[in-house]
Image: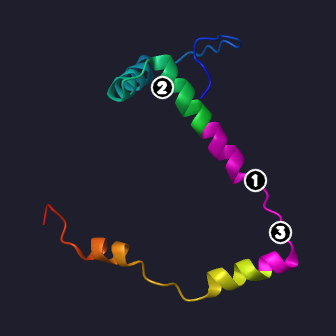
Amino acid sequence: MRSAARKEHPLSMRLPPEDVELIDRAAGARGRSRTEFVREAAVRAAEQVLLERTLVRMSPQGFAAFARAIAGRGKPVRALVDVLKRKAPWE
């Protein structure tokens, strides 16, 4: 994680008071400052956008292996099956 102490590129924006209040409440819930909270949220959103646009390349043989792997019948994961069979605590 980058250090928040260095301010190489300041960023300023105008927000409605209700947005600032919401951000401050969420930042407080996470034990973060407004600046830390907004920076982390913006960086996370930027990473997600770029990941959505990432092109995955593979050889024809690699793609064939991938297609076989996802086309095959799935195998149950015992721990997950057990969790899903449990009664919910509120029921």
Circle 1 residue: 54
Quick check: is 54 in the magenta stretch?
yes
Picture quadrant where residue 57 is located: bottom right
Q: Is residue 71 left or right of residue 41?
A: right
Residue 14 at x, y = what percent?
A: 56, 15
In this rendering, is residue 77 above or below 58? below
| Numbered marks: total | 3
* Helix, strand or loop status at disc 2: helix
Distance from label 1 to label 2 (Cα)? 26 Å
Residue 31 at x, y = what percent?
A: 36, 24
Circle 3 residue: 58
Residue type, label 3: Met
Residue 70 at x, y = what percent?
A: 63, 80
- Kindly indicate whether the residue at mark 3 contacts the one at mark 2 (C-beta within 8 angstroms): no
Residue type, label 1: Thr
Residue type, label 2: Phe
Q: Farthest residue in the front direction?
A: 78
Q: Farthest residue in the left direction?
A: 91
Q: Residues within 10 Å of mark 2 (few under 14, many from 20)?
A: some
Residue in front for this viewpoint, 30 or 2: 2
Q: Which mark is residue 37?
A: 2
First reached walking from the N terminus: tag 2 or tag 3: 2
Quick check: is 55 in the magenta stretch?
yes
Give the magenta part as a residue range: 45-63
Q: Residues within 10 Å of mark 1 (few under 14, many from 20)?
A: few
In this rendering, is residue 40 above or below 81? above
First reached walking from the N terminus: tag 1 or tag 2: 2
Quadrant in which the N terminus is drawn: top right
Q: Main secondary structure of the magenta part?
A: helix
Q: Residues within 10 Å of mark 3 (few under 14, many from 20)?
A: few
Q: How is the image coloured?
A: rainbow
Label 2 vs label 3, nearer the camera: 3
